Image (tube, rainbow, N blue to C red):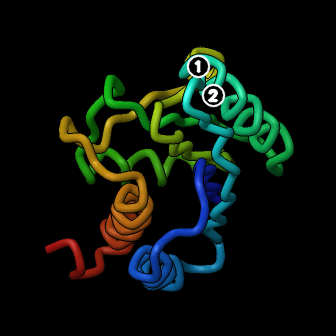
Amino acid sequence: MKISILAVGGKMPAWVQEGYAEYAKRLPREIEPRMVELALANRSKSYSVDAVKQAEGEQILGAYDNAPGHKRLICLDVLGKSLRTEMLAEKMAAWQMDGVNPCLVIGGPDGLSQSCLQRADEKWSLSGLTMPHPLVRVLLIEQLYRAWTILQNHPYHK
């Protein structure tokens, strides 16, 4: 199983890069988390939110289409399904058994395009709270690590 995280936006602060790297390196080689940063669409003074989301959505779906193997598109969205960490661990176990490479999508500041949301196999919400997108990267990779530790009966989750 190879996990891809498709994230709109780049130039993350050092604390985000360090936090992400810390949890990513803890995961075993067979999981191989891969961060794919996609450019933010141009936001001028008179930009259209729909046009920006559409441009970013095209990038996301293009990156997804180019990802390797049997894939599953999972969009992070405030209206998505809320998961418990144990449920995420169950999903990870199923992905490993089925040979699925999940692509987890973090949209831009304006959210995800309808084309992304419609094409998604699943939509998850990490929280009902509004979070800064850089923090979502760290939270997501930490939860993936935590779910993996549950599967390994590692004491990290306790």
Report which quarter residue 139 is drawn in: bottom left
Q: Residues within 10 Å of mark 1 (few under 14, many from 20)?
A: few
Q: Which mark is residue 48?
A: 1
Across and down, in percent, residue 85 comes to 27, 53
Q: Is residue 141 left or right of residue 85?
A: right
Across and down, in percent, residue 24 comes to 51, 77
At a point 70% along the width and 38% down the height, the residue shown is 60
Assign a secondary structure to mark 1. loop
Q: Is residue 1 visible?
A: no
Across and down, in percent, residue 16 comes to 43, 74
Assign a secondary structure to mark 2. helix
Quadrant of the frame with the N terminus: bottom right
At a point 76% along the width and 29% down the height, the residue shown is 58
Q: Residues within 10 Å of mark 2 (few under 14, many from 20)?
A: many
Q: Is residue 37 left or right of residue 128?
A: right
Question: Label 2 amino acid?
Answer: Val
- Judge whether 92 appears above or below 64 on screen: below
- Judge whether 111 appears above or below 143 on screen: above
Q: Is residue 108 left or right of residue 23?
A: right
At a point 40% along the width and 70% down the height, the residue shown is 145
In depth, the one of 42 and 30 nearer the eye is 42
Across and down, in percent, residue 129 comes to 19, 40
Q: Residue tagged by mark 2?
A: 52
At a point 21% along the width and 72% down the height, the residue shown is 157
Q: Is residue 135 visible?
A: yes
